[in-house]
Image (tube, rainbow, N blue to C red):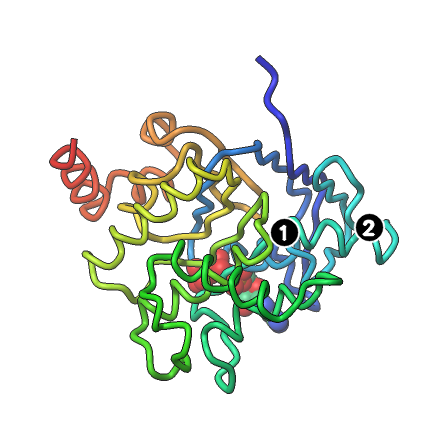
Amino acid sequence: MSQDVVIKLRGIRNAFGPHTVHENLDLDVYRGEVLGVVGGSGSGKSVLLRCIAGLRPPQAGTIEIFGQDALNCTEAARLEIDQRMGVMFQDGALFSSLTVRENVEVPLRTIDGLDAGLRRDLADLKIAMSGLPYKAGDNYPSELSGGMRKRAGLARALALDPEIVFLDEPTAGLDPIGASAFDELIKGLSRAMGLTVFLVTHDLDTLHATCDRIAVLADKRVKYTGTMEEMLKIDHPWVHEYFHGPRARAAIATKEKAQ
Ligand SMILES: Nc1ncnc2c1ncn2[C@@H]1O[C@H](COP(=O)(O)OP(=O)(O)OP(=O)(O)O)[C@@H](O)[C@H]1O
């Protein structure tokens, strides 16, 4: 069965001055999957996310999103692509001077003809879907815990009913209970909405709990892709240490306990 590729990267190069982060990087992301993106610190996971999300163009290569050339298209076509994607940054990247509801309303303002009442209702719906209590909509980001801020960031990423969401380290800084609640939320949303999730993480529990497939960044490219089972068989030193080290063993034990 052929799978529907929603993001297709070919020959991507990203560099900062003489420092090349990605060279000749290829990757396919399939519709409806949760893809975990892992790699050593500085391997370029966040740069890759930003490059696909249109925040920083690569120096070379092609990016197709929803079958369209995302780098060489009209501004209107790019806006249309952007409206079908949502991004959640590590710290939520919320506007501190706006309430949570107003933050979630920001992307909704790009839709013509949406009146204020409907915009508010849609924002409240996304706030509820992200597992925040209704009254959190009136809070400012500084009044929320780290976990709640992440949920608010997720609500904003979901504002436009995206088909793809990009999550940068969604569980970083959360306690284990908060992190597994967030894993469940991501998995539930992905299943319920058919979302494609591009998830940058270091968190082995998240990989076990939520990801259908994993992409490993190493040697400036996506060196391996596959299921967790396939990852466990790879004998590349970093990959082996990452998936078999003490933290990995703990994550496997946690998963087995949950089953
Ligand atoms: N704006 C920038 N200017 C210069 N160098 C940058 C910039 N952004 C990223 N880099 C460099 O690109 C490389 C990849 O960074 P990136 O943040 O993508 O790594 P990462 O894999 O997400 O790391 P981590 O797991 O530590 O978050 C790093 O060496 C970083 O210093």
> Mark number for residue 245?
none
Q: Quadrant of the C terminus?
A: top left
Looking at the rendered structure, the secondary structure element under dot 1 is strand
Left or right of 148 in this view: 8: right
Q: Residue 28 lies in what quarter of the image?
A: top right
* Most foreground residue, 189 or 44: 189
- Quadrant where ligand 1 appears: bottom right
In the image, what residue occupies the spot 73% across and 40% down?
64
> Mark number for residue 22?
1
Bin the neighbour count of mark 2 within 10 Å (Cα to Cα): few under 14, some 14-19, many 20 and up: some
In the image, what residue occupies the spot 51% across and 40% down?
195
> Mark number for residue 77?
2
In the image, what residue occupies the spot 15% across and 41% down?
254
- Residue 210 x/y as whole percent: 35, 40
- Residue 164 x/y as whole percent: 57, 45
Three-letter code for the amino acid on which mark 2 is drawn: Ala
Q: Residue 221 lies in what quarter of the image?
A: top right
Looking at the rendered structure, the secondary structure element under dot 2 is helix
Three-letter code for the amino acid on which mark 1 is drawn: His
Mark-to-mark CA distance, 1 and 2: 26 Å
Instruction: Name, please, the residue furthest toward the right.
Output: 74
- Residue 100 x/y as whole percent: 45, 74
Left or right of 217 in this view: 61: right
